[in-house]
Image (cartoon, rainbow, N blue to C red):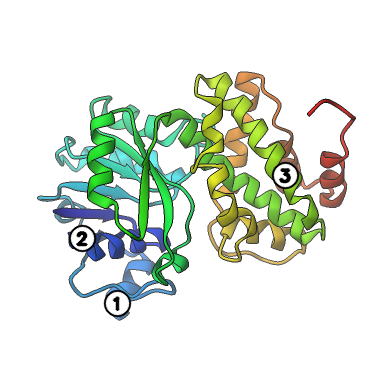
Amino acid sequence: MNITVLGCGRWGSFHAWYADHLGHTVTLWGRPGSQHMKELVETGKNEYVTLPKSITLTSDLQRALTHTDVCIISISSQQLRSFARQLKDSHISLTLPFILCMKGLEIGSGKRLSTVMEEELGPDVPVAVWVGPGHVQDFLSGMPNCMVMASKDTELTHRLVDIFTSPLIRFYYGQDLLGIEIGAAAKNVMGIAAGMLDGAHLTSLKGALMARGTHELSVLIAAMGGKEMTVYGLSHLGDYEATLFSAHSNNRRFGEDYIQGKPFHKLAEGVYTTEALMDLSHQYEVELPITHTVYAIVKEHQNPQEMLEQLFLRSIKKE
């Protein structure tokens, strides 16, 4: 089967490696002028993965999408709308399935990424999301994990799971696309909060963060029309170990470095997601205390120690 991966960063390069590992014919695309693609072309590797020579590398979008069966998109979530317009303008076939392998919400609207795709490419375009726990470094070392695939179309979900399941990644069928997308995006915000607790020497509060974090997101998901129990699945709570505790987590590291006043130069999607979740909090009139605290620290530059202690020492109430 021909698989195209659009986006050649950490996860894009891994998805290309993984599809090749399963025996598919793989094309990996990067933007013209991309430093990530330049590195892969010149050396065949990046700081995470060494790509086999069987993978075709290109910056020609038309070439990348010609004669492909499945398209994986792995780019920054905030670039998705403009990129979807680029796909539409390229006059490619919009009947092939697109799998979104990133976690985020659109700033300014709070819209889910599958919604952005539908708005730009039309409601009939097959769109799925691939999310869940795991780090590139662990997968490449042979450490297996469980992930989730979800779409509005049950048949499409099952077909994609059949294509990509292996002993390295065991997939579960997602039943609630809305809840899965919100939960997957929001876990990055909880990752930032966890890093802040580490940086403030309040690591013992991570248990409270896990319990209250899942609760506040379950309330939001229910208010939006999703299933509140979805947040306790692989897309959110199931990803906590990889996000709240792992040294590999960019979001956790960002939070820790922010508290300690250290510069952080990698992408932490949770920063953008915090803004989008605050939009949803106002839109659906749902209180999101942890999200609000992260927002107050990062965007409003309020005192981190005071905000974190205030968060967990709020007035007494029923759990």
User: Mark 2 or 3, which is nearer the eye?
Assistant: 3
Is label 1 in a helix, a strand or a loop? loop
Looking at numbered disc 3 in the image, what kind of residue is underneath it? Leu
Q: Residue at x 82, y 25 (%)?
A: 318
Mark 2–mark 3 contact, CB under 8 Å? Answer: no
Label 2: few (<14), some or many (≥20) within 10 Å? many
- The label on residue 27 is 2
Q: Considering depth in this image, is 51 or 29 the residue closer to the camera?
A: 51
Is label 3 in a helix, a strand or a loop? helix
| Residue 272 visible within the image | no
Q: Residue at x 64, y 26 (%)?
A: 281
| Residue 307 visible within the image | yes
User: Mark 3 or 1, which is nearer the eye?
Assistant: 3
Q: Residue at x 23, y 31 (%)?
A: 155
- Quarter placement of the C terminus: top right
Q: Residue furthest front?
A: 167
N-term mark: 2 or 1: 2
N-term mark: 3 or 1: 1
Residue 66 point in image, percent of width and height: 12, 50
- The label on residue 98 is none
Mark 2–mark 1 contact, CB under 8 Å? Answer: no
Disc 1: which residue: 44
Looking at numbered disc 1 in the image, what kind of residue is underneath it? Gly
Residue 156 point in image, percent of width and height: 24, 35
Disc 3: which residue: 209
Label 1: few (<14), some or many (≥20) within 10 Å? some
Q: State how far apart marks 2 and 1 are (Cα).
A: 14 Å
Q: State how far apart marks 3 and 1 are (Cα).
A: 40 Å
Is label 2 in a helix, a strand or a loop? strand
